[in-house]
Image (cartoon, rainbow, N blue to C red):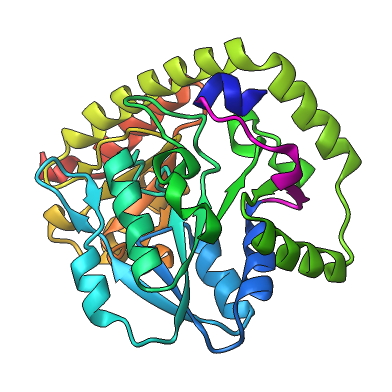
Amino acid sequence: GWMSRRHDWDVDPAAIFTTHGVVAGLALCLQAYTRPGDGVILFTPVYHAFHRIIAANGREIVQSPLVRRADGRYAMDLDVLAAALTGRERMLVFCSPHNPGGRVWSPEEIRALADFCRAHDLLLVSDEIHHDLVLSGRHVPTPIAAPESLDRLVMLTAATKTFNIAGCLTGNAIIPDPELRKRFAATHLASGTSPNRFGALMTTAAYAHGDAWVDALCRYLAGNAELFASGVGAIPGVRPMPLDSTYLAWVDFSGTGMPTAEFTARVEKGARIAASHGATFGKGGESFLRFNLATPRARVTEAVARLQSAFADLQ
């Protein structure tokens, strides 16, 4: 019902597997569809937990750095990726909307990626956990954007980011293709895991009664994002990425000319703000820090003031 109302997508209940979250769902995908030593492609910088879980499963991480468009947003360079393929790659993990860049991908970009996966015999695993938190534009689920690629698609979702219930450890793996379902089901059974009853109840309640709340949340987050971007963007050499989705601001400090250790120390020790280190997100993230804007606006205002003070000598 939620997918139908919010994303114009009618999901077959038989296609849905309950997992202990998106990262656990990815681990099951790795075990069901790849073997140790296989290559798994990531468009970097990307959510750091992907790197951890792929490595922990003994698969090879293949990093394909995103490029910056003229408007400051990320884009995929499929031509460069194609030239770098070795033939060992079996899976591509896609983050849509993108974390940490906040990019809402266009249907055309998603379709081009799905075509790429078909051409190179790759399974496409699409993490769409931030799909409800769109601040501008419209998110299109991968199964809607690329319906001809359902035979090589696994979509991972959860209510946990939308409703701040990550502690319930509940997510979904949505697998339209029956053959892929069989392979996933066998691995899921072998893992010995079962749904979290409290998480299922919380997710049901959120999806049944949460529409108006999420609408209000997105409006509030958009205000936080605008306030943060304008304030931090006023610091010379500091460049926040335009935020289409998520509550995570991705800020580039390369223009300050400072080494990573210096701008990080100014943020953590000078401004006394805990941010995620960009290097943990893979290639291309070294000059960035990620900030969480899912907090009362007064706290965002204070954070901006602290950051401006920490970099006051650049003014």
Q: Which quadrant does the N terminus fall into?
A: top right
Counting from the top left corner in percent of width and height, residue 293 is at: 45, 33
Residue 90 versus residue 68 in the image, above or below = below
Q: Depth check: give the residue in front, 209 or 167.
A: 209
Q: Depth check: give the residue in front, 31 or 148.
A: 148
Residue 10 versus residue 51 in the image, above or below = above
Counting from the top left corner in percent of width and height, residue 281 is at: 41, 63
User: Count of labels shown?
Assistant: 0
**As drawn, is 165 to the left or to the right of 293?**
right
Residue 141 versus residue 297 in the image, above or below = below
10 in magenta: yes
173 in magenta: no
Q: Which quadrant does the C terminus fall into?
A: top left
What residue is rendered at 31% in x and 81% in y?
85
Counting from the top left corner in percent of width and height, residue 230 is at: 22, 27
**As drawn, is 129 to the left or to the right of 285?**
right
What residue is rendered at 56% in x and 74% in y?
54
Q: Which residues are magenta?
A: 8-21
Counting from the top left corner in percent of width and height, residue 208 is at: 73, 18
| Residue 275 makes an appearance in the image | no
